[in-house]
Image (cartoon, grey):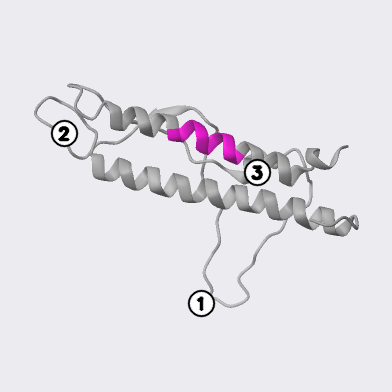
């Protein structure tokens, strides 16, 4: 197994591809904001746990040691597949895209993508340091 085939790199690469795909869908939503009858689309949330299923059989669980502790449950998510967004506002033409919401999604998507690329770069630097090479 090569270093770049490690589960952490595979997961980060998949996450970055998901963000790239989502950016394209969000751009389509913005571009069609004035198109009559257009309904915006978005991707299902990326789920690291689902991506990591095949890599490890180890699991971590939590338990409440006192009755006042919070219970912890798993997050729901899915694979890439585009889905229609729930539109709360519709224009008289039947368009369900709100530019302000789309631009906030674009900004959040960009920040998450930058965080994933930063993690990827730092992981490579750590491996280089561990192998005795200068980063």
Name the one closer to the observer, 17 or 68: 17
Total labels: the figure holds 3
Q: Residue 114 colored magenta?
A: no
Q: Residue at x 51, y 34 (%)?
A: 20
In the drawing, does residue 47 fall left or right of residue 61?
left
Image disc number at residue 12: 3
Name the one closer to the observer, 52 or 24: 24
Q: Which residues fall within the magenta stretch?
A: 15-23
Q: Can you name the residue that lies furthest to the right here?
A: 132
Q: Residue at x 45, y 45 (%)?
A: 109
Name the element at disc 3: helix
Hey, which quadrant is residue 5 in on the image?
top right
Disc 1 residue crowd, few under 14, some 14–19, many 20+, Cα 10 Å: few
Q: Can you name the residue that lies furthest to the front here?
A: 134
Name the element at disc 1: loop
The residue identified by callout 2 is 90
Mark 1 vs mark 2, foreground winner is 2
Q: CA distance from mark 1 to mark 2?
A: 43 Å
In the drawing, does residue 112 fall left or right of residue 40?
right
Decide which of tag 3 and tag 2 comes sooner along the chain: 3
Disc 2 residue crowd, few under 14, some 14–19, many 20+, Cα 10 Å: some
State if disc 2 and disc 3 touch (CB < 8 Å).
no
- In the image, residue 128 sits, relative to residue 90, either above or below, namely below
Disc 3 residue crowd, few under 14, some 14–19, many 20+, Cα 10 Å: some
Q: Residue at x 83, y 53 (%)?
A: 128
Decide which of tag 1 and tag 2 comes sooner along the chain: 1
The residue identified by callout 1 is 68
**Residue 106 placement (x, y as % from top left):** 39, 43
**Residue 124 placement (x, y as % from top left):** 76, 50
In the drawing, does residue 42 fall left or right of residue 95?
right
Decide which of tag 1 and tag 3 comes sooner along the chain: 3
Q: Residue at x 54, y 74 (%)?
A: 69
């Amino acid at each position: 197994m090569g270093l770049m085939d490690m589960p952490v790199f595979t997961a980060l690469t998949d996450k970055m591809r998901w963000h790239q795909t989502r950016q394209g869908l969000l751009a389509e939503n913005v571009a069609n904001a004035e198109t009559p009858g257009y309904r915006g689309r978005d991707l299902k949330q990326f789920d690291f746990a689902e991506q990591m299923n095949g890599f490890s059989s180890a699991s971590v669980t939590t338990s409440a040691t006192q009755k006042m502790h919070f219970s912890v449950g798993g997050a729901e998510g899915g694979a890439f597949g585009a889905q229609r967004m729930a539109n709360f506002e519709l224009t008289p033409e039947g368009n369900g895209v709100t530019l302000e919401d789309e631009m906030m999604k674009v900004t959040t998507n960009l920040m998450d993508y930058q965080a994933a690329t930063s993690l990827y770069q730092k992981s490579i630097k750590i491996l280089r340091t561990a192998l005795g090479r200068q980063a």
